């Protein structure tokens, strides 16, 4: 099979890129290791920046989002027993974020993918990439239903997540990796109960550790508490989780939390990671294949969307406008926004979590910084402009 772009991975990055290319008439194939049902079942964060919402509208998958996403004009930080609300709207000149689960984004993208009729190969095993730096086309080899297949493409877009094959296909002398692993995880619970704070996420700093009150809809809540990575889900009964969450938020929030049986409970590690460069020969990386942020601030999906906007533009310019400027500059320009967002996610993580090595002094310094944020319009503006999402440079 011959195509213009082989997209590896049908997560949000791969599906968004497919939709952009489809609308510009660029021929492409998506090759995904898992089944469609498996991809759909993954539960992840649920806050969209305006630029992500704009991209979803532009690629024609904004209809349900427009109906169901909940606007958040505010952001709340809770510490030392008190809640402090920041008006994103006022601090950024009218910007906001939207609460809409990544599962819903994936569903909308998959529905659009099925309707557009372009090929998607699910359950492709042993995916390998070849001829990435030669003159001829690149080759993607994979096994599907027991048969080895080959796909020839002008370019390969590695949208295959942190554990994918694309990044690993770059020569080790070319690739530089930067990583920070945090000494704790997040225990997340999903429950069909009304959210305690429907119009603003509450990020909580307490001497017991971090907490987060989020939501998926007016009837479904998502809550998290910081926990040691050595904990197992079985250690956390629902009763223990709710008690711990309530102990970590301010008393007013604690009183308003409606508890109920969990419908999902999991522990996730926190990591910052960046791979450079994001292009080698005919291979481009986008999304989690190139970078990971800790979930504090919910930047993972938004960063994947901004990569895709730039990469999609670059590929469309190559095929439609016959201009290679975007292809040449994609890696450098995407990495600027990625590092700024990495910085913000690391900063918010450092501000809000209990670190085993900093103890009481660390806690006091965090409280001082939070106090500064609450009392300095300059500091609050910095928080808000990063939280709503930095602008995307065009290539
Ligand atoms: N071959 C084909 N597909 C692969 C391979 C492979 N070797 N390895 C992984 N994949 C698929 C995965 O099964 C997954 O469906 O690539 C997809 C990558 O999707 P995500 O991990 O969701 O990454 P991305 O699309 O970059 O999404 C970025 O969304 O999923 C969240 O945490 C993520 O918030 C981040 C954002
Ligand atoms: C979520 O709703 O899952 C969520 C919200 C905000 C975050 C992280 C996760 O910063």
Image: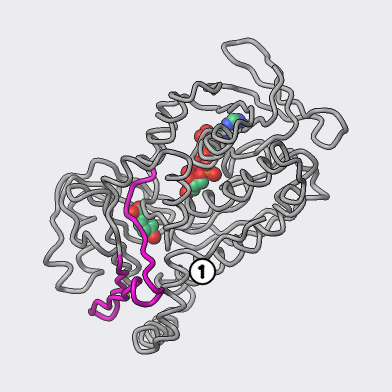
Magenta stretch, residue numbers? 73-102
Q: Is residue 87 left or right of residue 196?
A: right
As drawn, the residue found furthest toward the front would be: 321
Q: Is residue 308 above or below residue 148?
A: below
Q: Secondary structure at mark 1?
A: helix
Q: Quadrant of residue 96?
A: bottom left
Q: Quadrant of the C terminus?
A: bottom right
Q: Is residue 232 above or below residue 368?
A: above
Residue at x 21% of width, y 62% of height = 197
Nearest to the observer: residue 47 or residue 89: 89
Q: Residues within 10 Å of mark 1 (few under 14, many from 20)?
A: many
The question of residue 91 being in magenta is answered with yes
Q: Position of residue 375 (x, y in %)?
A: 35, 89
Residue 124 appears in the figure = yes
Quarter of image, res 62: top left
Residue at (16, 67) in percent of width and height? 254
Residue 198 as seen in the image, left or right of residue 375: left
User: Residue 50, position in %: x, y?
Assistant: 42, 58
What residue sits right under mark 1 in the picture?
A: 344
Is residue 187 at all visible to an observer of this figure? Answer: no
């Amino acid at each position: 099979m011959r195509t213009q772009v082989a997209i590896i991975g049908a997560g949000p990055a791969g599906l968004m890129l497919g939709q952009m290319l489809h609308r510009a008439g660029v021929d492409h194939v998506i090759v995904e290791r898992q089944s469609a049902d498996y991809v759909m079942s993954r539960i992840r964060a649920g806050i969209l920046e305006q630029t992500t919402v704009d991209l979803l509208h532009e690629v024609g998958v904004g209809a349900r989002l427009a109906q169901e996403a909940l606007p958040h004009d505010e952001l709340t930080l809770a510490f030392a027993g008190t809640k402090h609300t920041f008006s994103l709207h006022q601090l950024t000149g009218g910007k906001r974020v939207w609460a809409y689960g990544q599962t819903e984004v994936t569903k909308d993208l998959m529905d659009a993918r099925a309707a557009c009729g372009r090929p998607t190969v699910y359950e492709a095993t042993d995916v390998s990439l070849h001829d990435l730096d030669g003159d001829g086309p690149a080759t993607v080899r994979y096994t599907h239903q027991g048969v080895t297949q080959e796909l020839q493409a002008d370019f390969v877009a590695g949208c295959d997540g942190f554990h994918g094959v694309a990044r690993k296909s770059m020569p080790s002398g070319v690739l530089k990796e930067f990583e920070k692993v945090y000494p704790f995880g997040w225990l997340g619970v999903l429950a069909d109960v009304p959210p305690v704070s429907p119009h603003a996420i509450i990020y909580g700093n307490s001497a017991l550790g971090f907490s987060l009150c989020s939501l998926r809809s007016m009837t479904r809540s998502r809550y998290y508490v910081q926990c040691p990575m050595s904990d197992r889900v079985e250690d956390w009964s629902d009763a223990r989780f709710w008690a711990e969450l309530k102990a970590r938020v301010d008393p007013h929030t604690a009183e308003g939390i409606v508890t109920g049986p969990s419908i999902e409970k999991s522990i996730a590690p926190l990591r910052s990671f960046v791979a450079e460069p994001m292009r080698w020969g005919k291979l481009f990386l986008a999304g989690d294949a190139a970078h990971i942020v800790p979930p504090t601030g919910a930047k993972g999906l938004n960063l994947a969307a901004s990569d895709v906007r730039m990469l999609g533009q670059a590929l469309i310019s190559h095929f439609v406008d016959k201009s290679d400027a975007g292809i040449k500059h994609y890696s450098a320009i995407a990495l600027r926004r990625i590092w700024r967002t990495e910085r913000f996610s690391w900063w918010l993580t450092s501000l809000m979590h209990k670190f085993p090595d900093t103890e009481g002094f660390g806690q006091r310094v965090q409280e001082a910084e939070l106090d500064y944020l609450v009392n300095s319009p300059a500091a609050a503006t910095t928080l808000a402009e990063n939280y709503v999402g930095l602008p995307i440079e065009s290539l």
